[in-house]
Image (cartoon, rainbow, N blue to C red):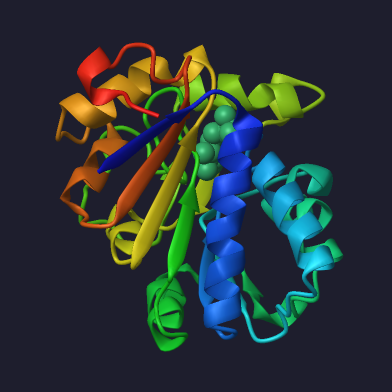
Amino acid sequence: MELKVLKSSKDIADLVSNEFINLIKEKPNAVIGLATGSTPIETYEAIINKAKKEMIDFSSIQSFNLDEYLNNQDFSQSYRYFMDSHLFDYINIKKENTHFPSEENYKNYDDEIKKAGGIDIQLLGIGANGHIGFNEPGTSFDSKTHITQLKEKTIHDNARFFKDISLVPTSAVSMGINTILNSKRIILIALGKNKAQAIYDTFNKYDVSCPASSLSKHNNVTIYCDEEAASLLKKELVHE
Ligand code: GLP
């Protein structure tokens, strides 16, 4: 895993958005894997700005999102709503080419990704407990897209987006760890000191207790951190 520590989240968003823009220029029918949460918002803003400036065409792009809540009563907190309002409504991607896992399609989701040609770049955030997508600690590294129960920690962390913690869904459907590892390239972004322990574990374990540590067996992963997220890593690992 390649580690890049940058001073600001804006610098990270700039580099990561460049990768997506360059991919789409080179491969107009690329397949992109997308994440939600507060972490990728700046990257999506940067993609929108560059796409406008450079007239980037997303009309043949397919996207597959990592995860979606189940039994969610607040549509404005659904990941579909998040993606529409933070990215899809501002680029010319076709809505029918934007895929989300659901209770209905999850058994075929891995096959759909394969049929589309496989994910060229998968973007990831990381949970404070090391989860990727909604693959909580304990999830098998061989897992495919599946239904999962959220851990207390995750429900608590995600409560900030809801009016009340009782409204946070307790289950979700998520790409599995194996699904994620089948991507050709993976970019994980971690921001803030709340992620420092998860990033430390990602580099120092290979264990289901830290789902993100599964990434160490993939040969094309870059982890972008700000200084706070990288603060527990040994100095010799960290270079800009
Ligand atoms: C959620 C999502 C993850 C995301 C994580 C971190 O649980 N399912 O895909 O990486 O939150 O979110 P944030 O970026 O808001 O810290």
Residue 130, percent across and down?
A: 36, 30
Residue 32, percent across and down?
A: 53, 68
Q: In which quarter of the image is ligand 1?
A: top right
Residue at image point 39% right, 24% down: 129
**Most distant residue in the front direction:** 240
Occupied quadrant, residue 10: top right
In the image, taking residue 197 as reference, residue 161 lies left or right, namely right
Residue at image point 63% right, 27% down: 158
Residue at image point 29% right, 38% down: 211
Query: In this rendering, is residue 203 above or below 66?
Result: above
Query: In this rendering, is residue 24 above or below 125?
Result: below
Q: Quadrant of the C terminus?
A: top left
Residue at image point 49% right, 15% down: 194
In this view, the residue in front, 109 or 191, is: 191
Residue 18 visible in this rendered orientation of the protein:
yes
In the image, taking residue 136 as reference, residue 168 lies left or right, namely right
Residue 14, percent across and down?
A: 63, 45
In this view, the residue in front, 128 or 188, is: 188
Q: Could you tell me how many numbered marks the image carries?
A: 0
Residue 35 visible in this rendered orientation of the protein:
no
Residue 33, percent across and down?
A: 51, 63
Occupied quadrant, residue 2: top left
In the image, taking residue 69 as reference, residue 107 lies left or right, namely left
Query: In this rendering, is residue 32 above or below 166?
Result: below
Q: In which quarter of the image is the N terminus?
A: top left
